[in-house]
Image (cartoon, rainbow, N blue to C red):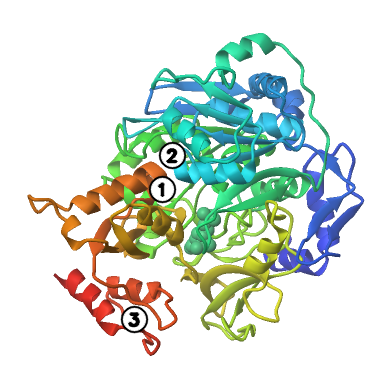
């Protein structure tokens, strides 16, 4: 058996040979002639000359051996729906969706924006895009009109696919008014909107623009839509993620590299076996959902569970009842969800037969040791923390038990995965910190492995500047995370170096939230920071300088402005971005050059030392925040 060390070494010393072997895990219509192309750094390209298709690899190629095996299992504890599609049925539905897309004028390279709850049609739409070479851009259903509008404007989709409503905890969220408002706000208008009617909220169709999924499906019944063979480096999708500026970045991914990366990760990391069932509790609106709800498990020939609902409704045993019922072999979730479950009786999990489960993978935010221990005790299977980002597409740091079994260390996601040249770097000099336990920025050297982002959609310059030039004079990819590596080579992630916060595993930019709050007429200035929270990892806290102090409270002394600001964020960005509190101050701490000292505010909120304040313009501003919090 190969040791992981040898496996890793080959991946970085002989990337061509290593990835040529991994490329055999998928079907190619034309096999690639060139593995790694690093001629134009930092734009690494993979599998040149190769032609393939993600939908073919996820669906069609399984028809021969497992056509009657479950492929997509949809469970909604919100509506009570439960339905299973075999690979053959999925193939049928995806062709139908592809026929509808084509009928609406969508072709190769066109963008299709998908704004949907966790329903089968969302997966059909994604796979249909992949099938015909259209570029999908899925926007998380929890985002509201302003977030959605900026994504519509940037992606410039020909078509938007959506539904009347989603539901969370029994509360129906109507999507159509948010979508209509977003289209109104966006300078780009889609030619068509395809709506799934779940009969949960009014649809109010716009004549000539809006189409009903079921009605249109009747027209295209039985149409055959073959897979379009795409160049490995064609674009499969874009997906927006937050950064330091208010403008979200469209992370762009290829076809062949992504397919190979996922096939390899399903084998080496997830230990997926064709015929098994995979249950990833994320949402299709996040990269985890793209990689490990939709493409990864299906490429591996596994059934995948698409779950709409909370982990604790009707009770905290619901996920484990699904593990028993569908004989789930691998599960993927986020630490936040486990912290929610931890508040409930472990007996609710233990009453189900969980013997099919081989491992639980957790990602998206730091996994604290008590949470890891609690779930490890409850399940008795390996708990595998994995660290990665929207940009990377699949784990950078974890344990590859499919290659060689290795012990996890609580608090550490693990060691660098094959293909990733991870290093810890001094944040200003750019010097690599080679001694153990030195804190620095987690960075990655070229070439980047398959599955990594190609660029930022329509903005190569921003891609280079944002990610590759964070340290003057050095070209290396910055994850914008602090980290250390211990003497055994295990890494520990210590939080972001930028203004990105992580609320319940959801990545949000504080600038976006600040922009939304600033749109309220009563707000003169605002600073948003992420503050440690025992349940959600972090929550957003806003400090606002009101235009008129008298506006803050109403006659009854209630926090009128706080409520209004929260409502504004809810309707513009979505409830995920709503700050936990809005506090009012007369000034914000800034440097003499006018830069907001967010990190100092955050330190004060978390009861830490704010550090070097020699550049602060007015120390009383920070003192005011301290007193406010103490009060
Ligand atoms: P996203 O792009 O939404 O997946 O968020 C990526 C960010 O989430 C990373 O840059 C980290 O800050 C954080 N993150 C993801 N996974 C982990 C993990 N296993 N441990 C610690 N932080 C993580």
Looking at the image, which residue sits at the far left? 556
- 526 left or right, relative to 219: left
Q: Marks 3 and 2, how far apart in space?
A: 47 Å
Q: Earlier in the sequence, mark 1 or mark 2?
A: 2
Q: Quadrant of residue 273?
A: top right
Q: Residues within 10 Å of mark 3 (few under 14, many from 20)?
A: some
Q: Which of the image's four quarters has the C terminus?
A: bottom left
Q: Is residue 189 visible?
A: yes
Disc 1 within 8 angstroms of ligand 1 (CB): no
Q: Which residue is under mark 3?
A: 610
3D distance between C-alphas at marks 3 and 1: 40 Å
Residue drawn at 45 percent across, 19 percent down: 204
Residue 379 got which mark? 1
Q: Nearer the viewer, mark 3 or mark 2?
A: 3
Element type at marker 3?
loop
Foreground residue among 288 and 83:
288
Q: CA distance from mark 1 to mark 2?
A: 8 Å
Q: Secondary structure at mark 1?
A: helix
Query: What is the crowding at mark 2: few (fewer than 14 residues within 10 Å), some, or many (at least 20)?
Result: many
Seen as rendered, the residue at the extreme bottom is: 614
Are the two marked residues, 3 and 1, in contact with CB atoms closer than 8 angstroms? no
Q: Position of residue 524 (x, y in %)?
A: 32, 62
Q: Return the residue at label 2.
A: 354
Closer to the eye: label 3 or 1? 3
Q: Secondary structure at mark 2?
A: loop
- Ligand 1 closer than 8 Å to the CB at disc 3? no
Q: Which quarter of the figure is the N terminus placed in?
A: bottom right
Query: Mark 1: few, some, or many residues within 10 Å (few <14, many ≥20)?
Result: many
Q: Would you say the residues marked 1 and 2 are in contact, meaning their CB atoms lie under 8 Å apart?
A: yes
Percent x, y of residue 180:
48, 31
């Amino acid at each position: 058996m190969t040791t992981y060390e040898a496996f890793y070494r080959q991946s970085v010393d002989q990337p061509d040979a290593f990835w040529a072997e991994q490329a055999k895990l998928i079907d190619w219509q034309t096999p690639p002639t060139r593995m790694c192309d690093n001629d134009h750094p930092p734009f690494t390209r993979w599998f040149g000359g190769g032609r393939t298709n993600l939908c073919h690899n996820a669906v069609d190629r399984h028809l021969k051996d497992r056509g009657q095996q479950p492929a997509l299992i949809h469970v909604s504890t919100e509506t009570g729906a439960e339905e299973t599609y075999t690979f053959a049925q999925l193939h049928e539905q995806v062709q139908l969706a592809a026929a509808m897309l084509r009928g609406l004028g969508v072709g190769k390279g066109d963008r299709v924006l998908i704004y949907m709850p966790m329903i089968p049609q969302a997966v059909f739409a994604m796979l249909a895009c992949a099938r015909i070479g259209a570029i999908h851009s899925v926007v998380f259903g929890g985002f509201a009109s302003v977030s959605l509008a900026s994504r519509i404007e940037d992606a410039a989709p020909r078509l938007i696919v959506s539904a009347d409503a989603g539901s969370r905890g029994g509360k129906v969220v109507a999507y159509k008014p948010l979508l209509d408002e977003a289209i109104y706000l966006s300078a780009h208008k889609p030619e068509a909107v395809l709506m799934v009617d779940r009969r949960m909220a009014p649809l109010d169709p716009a004549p000539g623009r809006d189409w009903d999924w079921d009605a249109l499906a009747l027209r295209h019944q039985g149409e055959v839509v073959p897979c379009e063979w795409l160049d490995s480096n064609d674009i499969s999708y874009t997906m927006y993620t937050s950064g330091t500026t208010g403008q979200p970045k469209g992370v762009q991914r290829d076809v062949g590299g992504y397919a190979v990366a996922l096939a390899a990760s399903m084998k080496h990391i997830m230990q997926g076996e064709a015929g098994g069932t995979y249950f990833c509790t994320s949402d299709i609106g996040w990269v985890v959902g793209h990689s490990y709800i939709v493409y990864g498990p299906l490429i591996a020939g596994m059934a995948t569970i698409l779950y709409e609902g909370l982990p604790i409704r009707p009770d905290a045993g619901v996920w484990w009842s699904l593990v028993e019922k569908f004989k789930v072999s691998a599960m993927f979730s986020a630490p936040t969800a486990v912290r929610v479950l931890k508040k409930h009786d472990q007996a609710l999990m233990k009453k189900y037969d969980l013997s099919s489960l081989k491992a639980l993978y957790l990602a998206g935010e730091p996994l604290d040791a008590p949470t890891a221990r609690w779930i490890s005790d409850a399940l008795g299977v390996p708990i595998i923390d994995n660290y990665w980002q929207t940009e990377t597409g699949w784990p950078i740091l974890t344990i590859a038990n499919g290659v060689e079994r290795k012990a996890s260390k609580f608090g550490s996601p693990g060691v660098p995965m094959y293909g990733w040249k991870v290093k810890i770097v001094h944040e200003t000099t750019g010097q690599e910190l080679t001694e153990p336990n030195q804190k620095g920025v987690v960075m990655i050297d070229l070439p980047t492995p398959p599955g990594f982002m190609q660029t930022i959609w329509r903005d190569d310059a921003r891609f280079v500047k944002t990610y590759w030039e964070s340290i003057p004079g050095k070209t290396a990819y910055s994850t914008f995370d602090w980290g250390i590596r211990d003497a055994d080579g295990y890494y520990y992630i210590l939080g972001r170096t930028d203004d990105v916060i992580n609320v319940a595993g959801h990545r949000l930019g504080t600038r976006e939230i600040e922009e939304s709050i600033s749109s309220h007429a009563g707000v003169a200035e605002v600073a948003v920071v992420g503050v440690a929270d025992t349940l959600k990892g972090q929550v957003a806290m806003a400090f606002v300088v009101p235009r008129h102090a008298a506006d803050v409270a109403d006659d009854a002394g209630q926090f009128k402005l706080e409520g209004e600001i929260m409502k504004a964020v809810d309707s513009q960005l979505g409830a995920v971005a709503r700050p936990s509190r809005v506090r009012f101050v007369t000034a914000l701490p800034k440097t003499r050059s006018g830069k907001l000292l967010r990190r100092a505010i955050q330190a004060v909120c978390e009861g830490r030392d704010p550090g070097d304040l020699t550049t602060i313009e007015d120390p009383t501003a920070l003192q005011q925040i301290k007193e406010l919090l103490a009060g």
